Amino acid sequence: MTMRRALISVYDKTGVEELAAALHKAGVEIVSTGSTAATIAAAGVPVTQVADVTGFPEILDGRVKTLHPRIHGGILADRRK
């Protein structure tokens, strides 16, 4: 079974609620950072915080959020191996 997951982290939140809702409707699990996750959650769309995936909080006033082996390992993984 293929895991369907999207990582969403945006500065400009315009339209992110609609994007997240469409992804959720398509069966995609949403993982997001800080205020992006809050915006998505406020729209009633289920979202998992990146910090819950990594077990590590955002640092440097939220400027470093996704630089973690659990995130980059998932992005760069070769699922054929």
Image: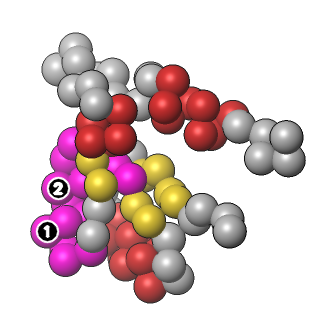
Q: Observer-nearest residue: 45 or 35?
A: 45
Q: Residue furthest right?
A: 80
Q: Tell me where the magenta segment starts and ends, as one range.
A: 31-45
Q: Observer-nearest residue: 78 or 33?
A: 78
Residue type of the residue flagged with mark 2: Ala
| Disc on res. 42 | 1
Position of residue 53 measured from the top left corner of the image (x, y, whole percent): 35, 41
Which quadrant holds residue 59? top left
Q: Residue at x 47, y 50 (%)?
A: 7
Position of residue 2 measured from the top left corner of the image (x, y, whole percent): 67, 65
Position of residue 79 measured from the top left corner of the image (x, y, whole percent): 77, 47
Q: Main secondary structure of the magenta part?
A: helix
Q: How many marks?
A: 2
Task: Say what secondary structure mark 2 lies in.
Answer: helix
Magenta segment: does it hold 36? yes
Q: Residue at x 35, y 32 (%)?
A: 54
Residue that badge 2 annotates: 38
Q: Residues within 10 Å of mark 2 (few under 14, many from 20)?
A: some
Task: Say what secondary structure mark 1 lies in.
Answer: helix
Label 2 vs label 1: CA separation? 6 Å
